[in-house]
Amino acid sequence: MAAVDLTTHPGHLARRLQQAHYLLWNTMVSEEITSPQFAVLNALVAEPGLDQRTVGERVGLDRSTIAEVISRLGRRGLLDKVRDPQDGRRFLLRLTDDGLRTHRKLAVRTARMNQVFLAPLSAEEQGQFFDLIRRVSDAAEDLRNPAEPTPPQGQALANTTHT
Amino acid sequence: MAAVDLTTHPGHLARRLQQAHYLLWNTMVSEEITSPQFAVLNALVAEPGLDQRTVGERVGLDRSTIAEVISRLGRRGLLDKVRDPQDGRRFLLRLTDDGLRTHRKLAVRTARMNQVFLAPLSAEEQGQFFDLIRRVSDAAEDLRNPAEPTPPQGQALANTTHT
DNA sequence: CTGAAATACTCAGTGCCCTGATTAATTCGC
DNA sequence: GCGAATTAATCAGGGCACTGAGTATTTCAG
């Protein structure tokens, strides 16, 4: 009887939350365009002409995943991909008219969906919800990227190098 | 300039949270056994002899995904799968000794990992974190399964009017 | 008892997500 | 100038997650 209670495990809750979101997205926003795909469209609305890697950074997708997502959006004709004449390694990304239209349409539906999704929480609780999740995510992210160009010295930070 | 702010989108936050968790799990718990796999082991520690579908229900995985996860655990020799003599459609699942040992080992590490993951929050905030996420997930889940076969008129249950 | 419905599982197909290795282009050191 | 890092993208491979279709078994209706 050493079983643990998964409802107190943040990882399990995170997975369930994402599944719940997936469900609502599919029924209220789109069955064609996924949430990560919308995030990419959104990043290119904000900053047209970004390269692939930077888009991935903006929306939080690694190099492999962003390549797949962009390939799908390209196949659907929602964005164009051209080699950077300044740097032959890069591809510059830009939404097509269709991509722009799609983003506008989905942005509206997404807002409605978010309202439904968060409806069980009061306005104040919704603020806490964002704040708590953001703080946990950011902290974990920082563990990966030690970051902070602090004065080169002080090895105090735990560098757990065990096995 | 119609781009939206993704940091106020619960779906985006949920995805980031899960990625953060994945990262910590990989470094602090196991590179072999994943979090969903551990959830299955845990369900079978709590209730040995469950069938595949029910395990999926317990841990929140659909029929296809649970089949894959169980197949992997079987390949690793962590569980056994035998046909139910009572009902030839079902497979009954049971952990092997190795599966039991693995669960015990990972349960300890998982507890440590959760502490690190939630360290940025105070004890009170951790409670809120669980509560808020659970409420949002449960509500979305209920939208799928309208549940409650027709409001049982009258005294169905829990009408204690004394709060 | 027998054919229809329900149920447990499998299979095919799509998409997200990561790591490690590889390729092509640029930049840096000397 | 030129070879050595560095960097952007791709490819191979493993795992999670869902839907729709198909198979086998059980249950239920008449």
Image (spheres, coloured by chain):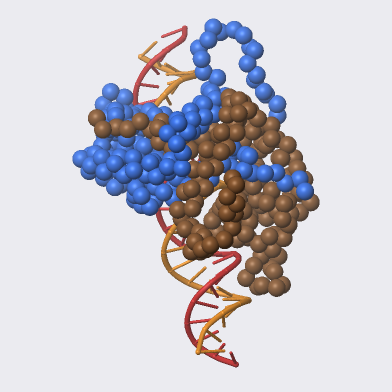
Chain colours: A blue, B brown, C red, D orange
The residue depicted at 64 percent of the width and 47 percent of the height is B39
Residue A72 location (% of width, % of height): 35, 45
Q: Residue furthest left?
A: A97
> Where does the image place residue A81, in percent across and percent down from the top left?
28, 36
Q: Residue at x 51, y 32 (%)?
A: A133
- Tell me: D29 left or right of B103: left
Percent of width and height locating residue A160: 67, 23
| Relative vertical location of residue C18 with respect to residue B60 in this rendering, above or below | above
Front-lying residue, D29 or A141: D29
Q: How many marks?
A: 0
Position of A116 with respect to A161 (left or right) is left
Front one among A39 and D29? D29
Residue appearing at x 76%, y 54% in the figure: B96
Asked whether residue A70 appears in the rendered view, the answer is no
Image side of residue A70 versus residue B129, left or right: left
Image location (x, y in percent) of residue C27: 38, 16
Name the image quarter holding residue B122. top right
Image height check: is B144 above or below A42?
below
Residue at the farthest front position: B162
Quarter of the image that includes the C terminus of chain A = top right
Q: Residue at x 34, y 43 (%)?
A: A112
Viewer-closest of A80 and B21: B21
For the question of whether residue B129 can be seen, the reply is yes
